[in-house]
Image: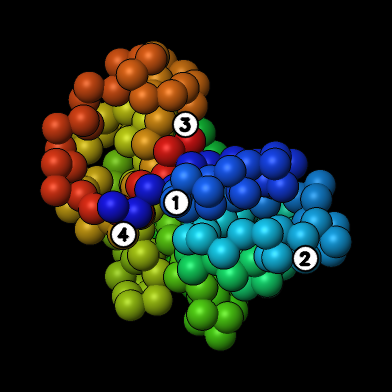
Amino acid sequence: MDVRLAFPLSRAEEALPRLQALGLGAEVYLDPALLEEDALFQSLRRRFSGKLSVHLPFWNLDLLSPDPEVRGLTLRRLLFGLDRAAELGADRAVFHSGIPHGRTPEEAMERALPLAEALGLVVRRARTLGVRLLLENSHEPHPEALRPVLEAHAGELGFCFDAAHARVFSRTPDPGPWLALAPEHLHLNDTDGVYDRHWNLGRGSWATGRGSVPTWTGPWSWR
């Protein structure tokens, strides 16, 4: 089973050697404040040879923002994040669509094809670097808002399912419709059903999705 524990970049130097000793993989969140730290990335590459994925920056980023400066910053963050993923030897890079919270189902669907077009450079960079690009559900009200994006880049863009996001942020808490998108990567963390707590499994009330992935072999990212 492919299990990867998630850590922010600020804790990676401490955590990655321990995970490697345990035979576990890792998923590192690429904090934008540390993306320029060349020495840190060189050190991490030397110290960890296990299975590794990254979570690309996402705070306040949106390729479809009405603000052109935000659109430009988002593209730069995603592209540079992919470069850093390749430097670390990561096989996968997870990212968010950037949809703001509270969008209606109609608004979410209207974003789909423009987002697919805006992702062209990002998908190409991931392909060139040999990093598998995975779109994670975040504030989408339903999985159908992601399907056109995944289909537009079929074969080059996969799906990462976050069960807590589906329960807390979406109007589709049942994991079944999300699993119909054939996820390649699964984010697991517990929640109280109201907030995105990122608790350890067993602390909250994640029972909704627990029985829906009995044959999943990974990668699991425990966050």
Which residue is under mark 3? 102
**Circle 1 Cα neighbour tier, 10 Å, few/some/many (<14 / 14–19 / ≥20):** few
Single out the mark in the foreground, 3 or 4. 4
Which of the numbered marks, if any, corresponds to residue 184?
A: 4
Q: Is residue 155 left or right of residue 118?
A: left
In the picture, measured across the screen, residue 91 lies left or right of residue 141, that is right
What's under tag 4, amino acid-wise?
A: Glu
Proximity of marks 1 and 2: CB atoms separated by less than 8 Å:
no
In this view, 45 is above or below 60: below
Identify the amino acid type marked 1.
Gly
Who comes first in sequence, dot 4 or dot 1? 1
Q: Nearer the viewer, residue 98 or 200?
A: 200
Of callouts 2 and 3, the N-terminal one: 2
Q: Position of residue 207 (x, y in %)?
A: 22, 22
Q: Position of residue 53 (x, y in %)?
A: 51, 58
Lower sequence index among marks 1 and 3: 1
Q: Residues within 10 Å of mark 2 (few under 14, many from 20)?
A: few
| Sequence-first disc among 3 and 4 | 3
Q: For the residue marked with disc 3, what is the amino acid? A: Gly
Of the image marks 1 and 2, the number of the one nearer the N terminus: 1
Q: CA distance from mark 4 to mark 1?
A: 21 Å
Query: What residue is pinned by disc 1?
Result: 23
The secondary element bearing badge 2 is classed as helix
Please name the residue shown 23% across and 58% down the image: 182
Label 4: which secondary element = loop
Name the residue tied to disc 2: 42
